[in-house]
Amino acid sequence: MLKLNMNNMNIFTILSGLFLLAGVGFYLYWGIRFGVWADIGIYSITIFFVLSGILGIILTLYDTPSKQD
């Protein structure tokens, strides 16, 4: 099971959160500004930012299991 530890938060976690917000914000901005919600180019940019943010947050907060003797 995946355990996330908030004590592992560092600058990379914050950067990953900004990537996540940038992806969602970019998609909403583009859709409102140009009225285009279904475009493969916008999807590809949004997916890159959102997945980078999610994976970065998971990887930085992942708590490695300790070896119990």
Image (cartoon, helix red, strand yellow):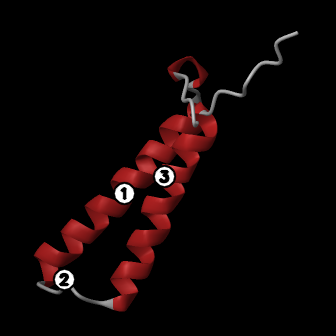
| Tag 2 residue | 37
- The reply to whether discs 2 and 3 touch (Cβ–Cβ < 8 Å) is no
* Residue 20 percent location from the top left of the image: 40, 53
Q: Which residue is painted at 55% across and 23% down in the image?
A: 5
Using the numbered discs, state the Cα–Cα distance from disc 1 to disc 3 in whole angstroms: 9 Å
Viewer-nearest of labels 1 and 2?
2
Dot 2 crowding, Cα within 10 Å, few <14, some 14–19, many 20+: few
| Tag 1 residue | 22
| Tag 3 residue | 53
The amino acid type of the residue labelled 1 equals Ala
- The reply to whether discs 1 and 3 touch (Cβ–Cβ < 8 Å) is yes
Looking at marks 1 and 3 on the same chain, the residue that comes earlier in the sequence is marked by 1
The amino acid type of the residue labelled 3 equals Gly
Q: Which residue is painted at 34% across and 51% down in the image?
A: 21
Looking at marks 1 and 2 on the same chain, the residue that comes earlier in the sequence is marked by 1
Question: Is residue 66 placed above or below 34 in the rendered structure?
Answer: above
Q: Secondary structure at mark 2?
A: loop
